[in-house]
Amino acid sequence: MSKSRTPSITPWLFLAPFLVTFAVFTIYPLSQSFVLSFQQTFGPRSTVPVGFENFRYLFTDPLFWIALKNTTLFTLGSLCVQLPLSLGLALLLNRPELKGRSLFRLIFFAPSLVGLVFVGMIFSLIFEKRTGLLNVVIHSIIPQFPLEFPWLQNYVMLALIIAALWLYVGFNMIYFLAALQNVPGELVESAGIDGAGPWDRFVHVTLPHIMPVAGFVVLLSILGSFQLFELPFVLLGGSGPENRGLTLVMYLYNTGFVTGDLGYASAIGWVLALILASVAIVQRRISRKGEE
Amino acid sequence: MKRFSPALLVIYPLLIFFSIVTLVPFAWMLCAAFKSNADFFNSLFLPQGSGFLGIAWDRLTLANFSKLFGELGMMRATMNSVFLASTTALLGTIGGAMGGYALAKFEFRGRKWMTRLILGAMVIPGPLLMAPGYQLMFNLGLLDTYAGMLLPAIAPAFGIFLFRQSILNSVPMDLIEAARIDGAGEIRIFATMVLPIVRPMIGAFLMITFLGTWNNFIGPQILFQSPEKFPLSVAINSLKGVYSQDYGMLMAGTLVSIAPILVLFLMLQKEFIAGLTAGSVKG
Amino acid sequence: MLDWLRNFSLGVWALIGLALVSSVYLVTRPTASSSDHAFWVFARLHFQAYEPFIREWNEKTPEMRIEPLLVSLPAMERRLFSGFMSGTPMADLFEITQNVTARLISGPAEDIGLRDLTDLLKAEGLLDAINPPSFSPWTLRGRIYGLPHDVHPVLLTYRSDLVEAAGIDVNEIETWEDFVRVMWPLQRTGGAGGEDRYLLNMWQTNSELLPVLMLQAGGGFFDANLRPVLDSEVNAMVMATIATWCTGPKRIAIDAPEFSASGNALKIRGQVVAAIMPDWLAGVWKTDIPGLSGKLKLMPLPAWTKGGRRTSVMGGTMMGFNKKVSEEVFREQWKFAQFLYRSPALAAEMFRRSMIIPPDRNLWSLPVFDEPDPYFSGQPAGRLFIEQAPDVPLRVSSPFFNGANEQSGQALLRLVEYANANGVYTVEGLLPKSRELLAEAQAQLKRQMERNVFMREAQ
């Protein structure tokens, strides 16, 4: 127990800015949106309480499930592709004898400095059929690859994963770089002297040491991926053909601000928040177990 | 010790390959910003022509930029962005550091719940708050004011979380204890002992917040009514017309938007990276 | 103290410096106080064209200064919603599109925040002066809530250089069937190497053109009572026909999207023979594809049946008035609207900049519309659009338009997939499946609509 004479109100004073702004700008609107989720609004001025109707409809709403499926696919795909790539890049860069490290670091990190809106704009042109950069380049390397490959019409998820890849690999790489730098070099070396090959060294020495960071990065990635909205919105100009690019937050936005049903939109938002909370809890449990 | 390892022979080409892949969209945007609209659809990067390297250098134009700053008053928008981003960054960092310190170095009832609250706050999806938030701003008279953007950002949950991690990991409890026993006031302890130690995190969070605010566009678009208050992100986005797209100008605007961030990042690079990682290493 | 200050890096000081400098900048340039009456405009083009006229108005009528503000359409929609719903600040006048209006005029009449203009329009004879179909998207239950900005008739543009070189006479084309038959010699299918050529700019993912063509044929999404009629026979026929354009041995369609580099490249390279063109699109092509100047001509849309309608409609903007504004102020603002929308000088200017024709019939005799247009090989493009203006189909504005568009777009996609999977490529062959898919789309849409408590009340 602390022996200091600090009055117990002090921590609360330090937390005061947060508490005040949180209460006013988050709790209050949140409670309002909670109320809204039990109502139906339509266009201006019309609000009617409908009990659990919104939630009941949600479970049979095909668009909601499409959005959920798309968002989950995107999250999983991103995780499986981005994280190994970030880790790989970090491993490549994690050599003291490598010249130009900061330059490479800067280059890989640069995409995350660009706003999502601009990324959407740039990539919508890159993914175009026939004249888009991607198709042109791939076609020149592999002539069998059709120039008309319809990224933004039939392979929407893939296109989104690629765009997100460009954006975030560098960001995650930084985390992994730091984690790698905390791995005691002697441990790795001694393992090497003991006869362990590079792969074994990686799996048995390096990997366990970077687990906490990996967990953190995974959590951030999941939370971010689940809230994907602006990227497909700008890239596809909406949800794409057959709603292949519809994500949960996009559905929320469309329902609330395009169709005008703020009640249903709030219901969707709450379901999303619940999903995110569960994921976060599960991830914390897993990573805590892993640390033991 | 610098030794030439054969692995480097494989690593360098790989890195260079990935760098090129990463930089290509930037290069493309750079070229697009200097092309006229007609040329935009004609050539992938630089317009073909009879100049040096087969490129029509004379068709490159600064018209997009002069239009941006002359006709469209981007200077004001840029200043708006600078003001909002820097002020939000400073306020958010102070608030975050304060909150993080409280959670890290004080034993008090409700600490566990506060920490859980902070974590919970991080998963609230923004769009959920958009509509009631707008309403609230109106009721508070904060609509179309800079204060309306700044006040909610004073103590962000993510900041408190990061600073808590950072302070927990790098500030030794004995140091604080000793100071407390010596009778030092909390503010003194905070300012003279804690802050200097978490300097990397300060740099990192400043950068993160600056970046986030700079690129934020849904929030300002909803809150601000008068065009003179629009930050760069909103101003550029409003260049997208319903009846036509001026791609050259859009890309020039994007370039203008990215440049300051790049410069700031170069300045804060070391701390940014150090601070970011300090918050994540011990989960 | 100095030691403590040194703890903070260069970056921190840079930020503090930036914050100070920018605050000073902003403080010394205070924003104009908005005592003027705000006029929200979303289209940059309109905004720029209006400026001199608004300035003129403000000079002549300083007691009713109008302040134009460029607000993006989504932001404007949010603000109007919020303004009507909760009284947050709103403009007095605003230009909005059909979709936004649809959402604002749904629900009971007392709740509509837009001013009802019907009686005024009647009294001032505007119901005759303005092209009647232009009122349709802003009309609900016989009451008109907006002043139309445009007509947006639709023509077909085609590569006159290619067509005439092949000896094809477009006067032989009366229906879409004729179009496919007569233009067939120009069709070159196969190969993505850039030598292929297709007759029409269309694709199964282009759901925007679907309602355009359906309306032309006499179909559409909703009837006059706002009830969904997706599964009408006419719609099924149109959809089946479009499917045969997009796939199969008689494929004539190519995906050359507007506002895209690849789409424009295809057009420039001569791989697209014809495209469906509303007036505003002509303006876009002129700006974005100057290389096609002199190679294009305009003609009325091929009809669906002999003697059928040869035009359609795509898009639409109106000016709305905030109901809450006092009667006096509104009178003045109404004068302003007349000044703006019925000004011959502005109409000519808008046309020159964007090819958009005004809905005011009195303005149709302006000489600017008869000027030979070099882009369209010397044709009087304005006159050609105006000729079709009276025939423009009526539309209703349902807040469920987006949902209907989505469902029908999906139906089209599935129809094309079905065609490919089963090798059925004729209209008669696809008609049953087309009906079935549209019936499904209708059912889905109805489900969405029925869950809406307000729609039930309104009926």
Image (cartoon, coloured by chain):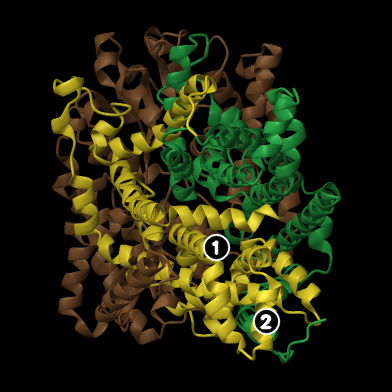
C223 or C8, which is in the foreground?
C8
Question: Could one spot residue C384 in this view of the protein?
Answer: no
* Disc 1 chain ID: B
A161 or C402, which is in the foreground?
A161
- Answer few, some or many: residues within 10 Å of disc 1's Cα (few below 14, many 20 plus, some between 14 and 19): many
> Residue type at mark 1?
Met
Q: Residue C452: x percent and y percent?
A: 72, 60
**What color is chain B drawn in?**
yellow
Q: Nearer the viewer, mark 1 or mark 2?
A: 2
Above or below B158: residue A25:
below
Residue at image x 32%, y 64%? Answer: B77
Q: Which chain is green?
A: A
* Disc 2 chain ID: B
Label 1 sits on a secondary structure element that is: helix
Q: Mark 1 or mark 2, which has the lower sequence index?
A: 2
**What color is chain C drawn in?**
brown
Residue B178 circle label: 2
Residue at image x 59%, y 47%? Answer: A178
Q: Residue C411: x percent and y percent?
A: 66, 33
- Determine which residue is flagged by label 1: B201
Residue C291 circle label: none
> Residue type at mark 2?
Ala
Q: Quadrant of residue B41?
A: top left
